Amino acid sequence: MLFRVDKMKQITLQKVFTHLPSLETDRLLLRAILPKDAEDMYAYSCREDVTRHLLWSAHPNLSHTEAYIDYLQERYAVGDYYDWAIVKKDEDRMIGTVGFTSIDTANNTAEIGYVLHPELWGKGIAAEAAREILRFGFEVLALSRISAVCMKENAASLRVMEKCGMRYEGTLHSAILAKGERRDVCLSAVLREEFQ
């Protein structure tokens, strides 16, 4: 029976994400990443200061970003990609991404992640976008728990988690291999009843 319930949840999830809904906050529009976003995405994805604490490396050129976005269109089409473009309403340009890095239907939990153009760091935008994803996760997907992780050195990301109402749960020592180096990871999470 558990397998059947989990399979039903996966089908529901696929239906939601094959038609990624647009979401709005006061300052932001969260929508699907589109081919027209390539230059905007490349503007921050090519920067070492952005990717220093991430698992992926800086994009080497615009063609790489264009190919990546083309690949994402395939992932959206089958409903197994859970990221939104962050767009500033007043500028109509993509400034980052936010979404679920993984969704565990068997345990009704998920993990979120976000990345933002450095020009907009420190303005509360990442927290505003992440809070909307948490709301969507709890209200629309009916998740029980949502977590986020960051490299131990990434204090700014940990602050974003705190601003979203996530609670620091601990440091996972040498938890991941990132760019050939073992790294400590900080874990934060929030439960549905805590968020509401």
Image (spheres, rainbow, N blue to C red):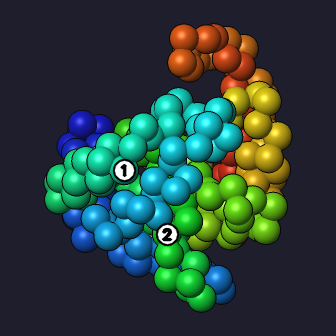
Mark 2 and mark 1: span between their CA atoms?
A: 15 Å
Going from N to C along the chain, the mark reached first, 2 or 1, is 1
- Note whether residue 16 is visible: no
Q: Which residue is mark 1?
A: 62
Q: Which residue is mark 2?
A: 94
Q: In the image, residue 46 lies at what x, y percent? A: 51, 44
Q: In the image, residue 128 lies at what x, y percent? A: 68, 70
Q: Is residue 148 left or right of residue 158?
A: left
Residue 158 picture quarter: top right
Residue 138 picture quarter: bottom right
Q: In the image, residue 167 lies at what x, y percent? A: 79, 46
Residue 168: give its label.
none
Residue located at (72% from left, 14% from top)? 173
Q: Is residue 107 left or right of residue 113?
A: left
Q: Amino acid at mark 1?
A: Leu
Residue 149 picture quarter: top right
Crowdedness near tag 1: few (<14), some (14–19) or many (≥20) residues, C-alpha within 10 Å: some
Q: Which quarter of the rendered picture does the N terminus lie within?
A: top left
Label 2: element kind: strand
Q: Amino acid at mark 2?
A: Met
- Check if mark 2's residue and mark 1's residue have beta carbons within 8 Å: no
Crowdedness near tag 2: few (<14), some (14–19) or many (≥20) residues, C-alpha within 10 Å: many
